[in-house]
Amino acid sequence: MGNKMIIDPITRIEGHLRIEVELDDNNVIRDAWSSITLWRGIETIVKNHDPRDVGLMVQRFCGVCTYSHYETSILASEDAFKVRPPKNARIVRNLMKGAQYLCDHIMHFYHLHGLDWVDVVSALSADPKKAVDLAMAYNPDPYNCSEGHYRAVQERLKRFVASGRLGPFANAYWGNPSFKLPPEANLVITSHYLDALQVSKTAAQMQAIFGGKNPHPQTLVVGGVSSVMDALDASRIGEYLFRLKEVNHFVETALLPDVLIAATYYKDEGAAGIGAGVPNYLCYGGFPLDDDWNATLLPKGVVKSRDIANPLPLDETKITEDVTHAWYKGEDNLHPYDGKTEPEYTGYTADGHVNGDGKYTWCKAPRYDGEPYEVGPLARFIVGYAQGHEKIKGLTDATLKAANLPVTVLFSTLGRTAARALETKLVGDEIANWVNELVANIKAGDTRTWTRCEVPRTGQGRGMNEVPRGALGHWIKIDNHVVSNYQAVVPSTWNCSPRGMEGKRGPYEESLIGTKLANADQPLEILRTIHSFDPCMACAVHIIDPRVDRIRMFKVA
């Protein structure tokens, strides 16, 4: 038995996540368990409701992924109703989801994950002039770049330090040997951390133009969208484009160069495959590009065993969820149409550790053809690269060439982080094309935004979507015009998966195996890899009262 370490909670994520690892005598991780510590009950809440209302309800899985669940639920109902929204609705949805991608990916790199790479306190010793030179080596016109600006950022940081309250930079592992950026790089990226607070807000405003508000937009309906006046209003489209220009400028001149800086100094970790995880990758396809919804911007398919020479088609019938090691009744491995959500909490061992042979998390274990799969930006780029996706392959090859790295570096924590940044550019560049498509369609006289439909007496449908964190699926069954069963398999369920009945670790768990901690009291390396997935446990938690170990009961007067 090695030394066990528990990190609970993992911070800078959405929701509640506990990681337990076993270290050998050299502080190398030889086993790991990921555990979601609160229960999600939304699937049971939506039963017996009108399926047209469910989209607004399941948004509440999370306060960040709201649009993702909203749209995917609508897609599931549309599949059950056998209705297809008109062209304008398809485009408006792409515009709303595109804004979500920009907001989410920028916020993730700087505010949730960036401080795993960047030593903020080190930035205090940087030479502002050298920082300018460094930034310009990665972009000819870096975002908000000047000696004066960098000095002002340093003064702001000094005030944090002098006050003894580091604010958003508190309680981190500053000075850890696993930080590798020079002070000037730390200063450049920290300055963009502060800039990104406003830029991510601007991206959220883009979504609100067509969604009514952010978070929890309100303008999707089964059969289309209800934001008719916004979609047909040139001034509203202009507001959207104005904000898009600002956000894309930040992506080009801050985000991409900053990730390339990180790749330069952490390339050895990437080349060594640290944080690689399971060797399988899956995606459902996202952002439909035609009225038949056959072509998509983001790919649909599977890569197994990192065999990028032989991509495989996706077979939806092979998707299951296993509860062998999850706090649910039974040991079932069911397709989501037949899925059950019946909690059975057994807790941890007497000394507070997971029972590795038993149940240890509220997260089910999604499997594809019996195997664990990673989902998310890295999966999309690996599947797209394997399929010869022109834009994905072009962005990937250009970045690898600039960093002087082989394609195998994708299979790492660094590769996962870089893929998300490249995807931000991919989606940002495509958005303007959708705006032009919308304008052209309206000018041609097509102003339809909704297809009339009725709730069937019985039916079933699924929404298969690619959202910022990965492959998201909602499955709905309808009886007597109301929901009789509902299951959502979210990206973080795939990635945070525990062992299944086959005993194989999920992606988070597997990604930590073999990682060496420079300092066992400062598990920076664990945070860096786990954060690279952009965990959203909020999509997998809800309503249990830890004081009484039962579901809370609420009465609305």
Image: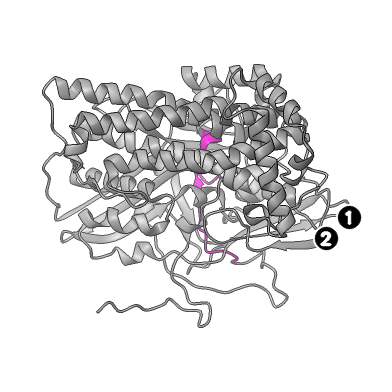
Residue drawn at x 58%, y 20% as measured from the top left? 141
Residue bounds of the magenta highlight: 359-379
Assign the N terminus to one quadrant of the image.
bottom right
Residue drawn at x 28%, y 64% as measured from the top left? 47
Question: Along the line of sight, which residue is nearer the eye, 229 or 88?
Answer: 229
Q: Earlier in the sequence, mark 1 or mark 2?
A: 2
Please provide percent x and percent y for residue 181. 76, 35
Q: Which mark is residue 2?
A: 2
Assign the C terminus to one quadrant of the image.
bottom left
Residue 230 visible somewhere in the drawing: yes
Does residue 289 sit above or below 108 in this rendering? above
Q: Secondary structure at mark 2?
A: loop
Q: Is residue 3 left or right of residue 226?
A: right
Does residue 555 sit above or below 94 in this rendering? below
Q: Is residue 18 left or right of residue 86?
A: right
Q: Are marks 1 and 2 in contact (CB under 8 Å)?
A: yes
Among the 4 quarters of the image, the one containing residue 123? top right
Residue drawn at x 11%, y 49% as measured from the top left? 454
User: Looking at the picture, which amino acid does disc 2 mark?
Assistant: Gly
Q: Which mark is residue 53?
A: none
Is residue 115 in the magenta section? no
Q: Which mark is residue 25?
A: 1
Graded by Cα atoms within 10 Å as few (under 14), some (14 to 19) or many (20 or more), the crowding at tag 1 reads: few
Residue 389 visible somewhere in the drawing: no
Residue drawn at x 63%, y 58% as measured from the top left? 10
What's the CA distance linking mark 1 and mark 2? Answer: 7 Å
User: Looking at the picture, which amino acid does disc 1 mark?
Assistant: Asp
